[in-house]
Image (cartoon, helix red, strand yellow):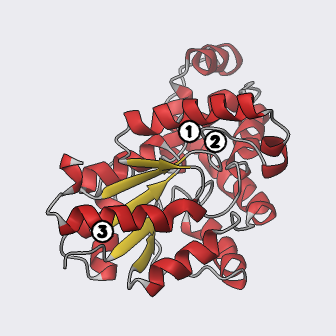
Amino acid sequence: MTKLEAAVFDWAGTMVDFGSRAPMGAFVKVFRDFDIELTVEEARGPMGLPKLDHIRELGKLDSVASQWRKVHGGDFDEAAARRIYEVFVPLNAAVVTDYADLVPGAADAVRALRARGLRIGSTTGYTRDIMERVLPLAEAQGYAPDNLVCAEDLWTGRPTAVMMWKCFLDLQIDDAAKVVKVDDTPVGIAEGVAAGTWTVGVAMTGNEVGLSAEDLAALSETERAAARARATARLEAAGAHFVIDTVADLPAIVEQIDARLAQGTRPLAA
């Protein structure tokens, strides 16, 4: 019977860092270091892209571009993006270990998938030097994927399929329809769509809601429902076949995907 052979997970907001909060403070601070005021909401917009691409996108915002011209006397260009990036990476690396706790239920979900015979891959918008700090902390909590593809490992990244192709090679996958990509950002979902995999969006622990577990729990049920609806709409618009609250909910979705594969359904027709 045709079944899923691999799951490929994003990191921040999906498997670790409930609310995807580690990059946000770093983006706001690094722009402030260049005398540019950036809101957390603005910083979250391009989340999921490789971090240099993320900075480039932020530079296209009218609010940032106008401030940059006023403060620095010229347009926000490639040189400006790279200057900020050089400061951003060590800044993000310095705080990322403070946000490396696994999302509750993540390790159990992965164990359930491995019990079904799935290989476990991962892609991230983080650079490898940042991930070198996160990997041992995740492993100590019970999560050690079979591969890792970082933003700067290849010539391009999300939203293209290139990092997913590297996962296919590493995990020895020859049919994209036997893979599920799990991510909390529209860009990460687009990565899976581009690769031809099944895609599962994670709504409540990731960038689209952007709250810590404690802050999320403090919301009223009406407020949580509204946040879930907003996040779900954005992830589905990016192409998510399914949207779940957290990765803890994934094993039940894998059963549904296996049932569809057994019927001959492929992800692009889902």
Q: Which label's residue is closer to the chain start, 1 or 3?
A: 1
Secondary element under disc 2, as helix, strand or loop, is: helix
Q: Is residue 153 visible?
A: no
Q: Secondary structure at mark 3?
A: helix
Q: Are marks 1 and 3 in contact (CB under 8 Å)?
A: no
Q: In the visual, does 202 lie left or right of 19?
A: left
The kind of secondary structure element at disc 1 is helix
Quick check: 22 above or below 237? below
As shown in the figure, which amino acid type bears the numbered disc 2? Ile
> Which residue carries the number 2 mark?
84
Residue 186 in sight here: yes
Residue at image point 67% right, 13% down: 70
Q: Are marks 2 and 1 in contact (CB under 8 Å)?
A: yes
Corner quadrant of residue 130? bottom right
Picture quarter containing residue 81?
top right
Residue 154 placement (x, y as % from top left): 36, 63
Q: Return the disc, 2 or 1, that comes first in the chain's sequence.
A: 1
Instruction: Return the disc, 3 or 2, that comes first in the chain's sequence.
Output: 2
Q: Residue at x 69, y 41 (%)?
A: 210
Query: In the rendered view, would you say 29 is above or below 174?
Result: above
User: Given the image, on which type of amino acid does mark 3 rest?
Assistant: Asp
Judge depth for marks 1 and 3 and give the one in front: 3
Q: Which mark is residue 219?
A: none
- Residue ID for mark 3: 258
Residue pointed to by mark 1: 55
Within 10 Å of disc 2 (Cα), the crowding (few <14, some 14-19, many 20+) is: some
Q: Quadrant of the N terminus?
A: bottom left
Q: CA distance from mark 1 to mark 3?
A: 39 Å
Calculate the distance from the C-alpha at mark 2 to the C-alpha at mark 1.
8 Å
Q: Which of the pair 97/9 is nearer the observer?
A: 9
